[in-house]
Image (tube, rainbow, N blue to C red):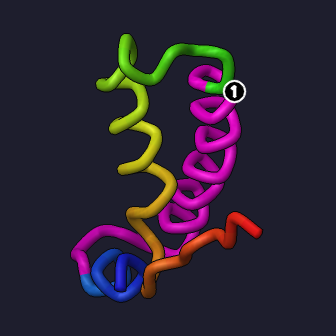
Amino acid sequence: MILETLQSSDGVNNAAISAIFCVKQAFVPSAREEIKDLLIINNCKKLLDYLRISIVSLNKENFASST
């Protein structure tokens, strides 16, 4: 979905798309580490930022099993 949107945008070539995805892949673990030891209730904005970044490119919902 995001890939198709980028590909259909004027002036966005494959190199730019690759760079965008590389930055995203580098940023997600960084954001995860940033919120790992924080109290979620006190850092709601950081949690929401992390969630937006980590799920923005998913085509379907993923649920982790707690078992």
The quadrant holding residue 56 is bottom left
Q: Describe residue 40's horizontal placement relative to residue 37 as left or right.
A: left
Q: Residue at x 69, y 27 (%)?
A: 33
Residue sticking out furthest to the right: 67
Per the rendered image, the range of residues in magenta is: 9-35
Q: Going by the image, does 61 lie left or right of 38?
A: left
Q: Nearer the viewer, residue 37 or 2?
A: 37
Q: Give residue 42's quadrant in the image.
A: top left
Q: Can you name the residue that lies furthest to the left here?
A: 10
Count the marks: how many?
1
Look at label 1 and name its amino acid.
Glu
Does 12 lie within the magenta span? Answer: yes
Instruction: Name above or below for residue 5 compared with residue 66.
Output: below
Above or below residue 27? Residue 39 is above
On screen, residue 51 above or below 48: below
What residue is shown at x 45% (from left), y 23% (from top)? 40
- Residue toward you, 25 or 29: 29
Dot 1 corresponds to which residue? 33
Q: Is residue 40 left or right of residue 23?
A: left
Q: Residue at x 34, y 75 (%)?
A: 6
- Who's the residue at 64% across and 69% down the image? 64
Residue 54 in percent (x, y) is at 51, 54
Query: Residue 45's x, y, as percent?
Result: 30, 24
Q: Quadrant of the N terminus?
A: bottom left
Q: Residues within 10 Å of mark 1 (few under 14, many from 20)?
A: few
Q: Quadrant of residue 9?
A: bottom left
Looking at this rendering, what residue extends furthest in the front direction? 67
Q: What kind of secondary structure does the magenta stretch mostly adopt? A: helix
Location of the C terminus (image quadrant): bottom right
Query: Above or below — where is 63 with respect to 31?
Result: below
Q: Residue 16 in the image: x percent, y percent?
A: 49, 61
Q: Secondary structure at mark 1?
A: helix
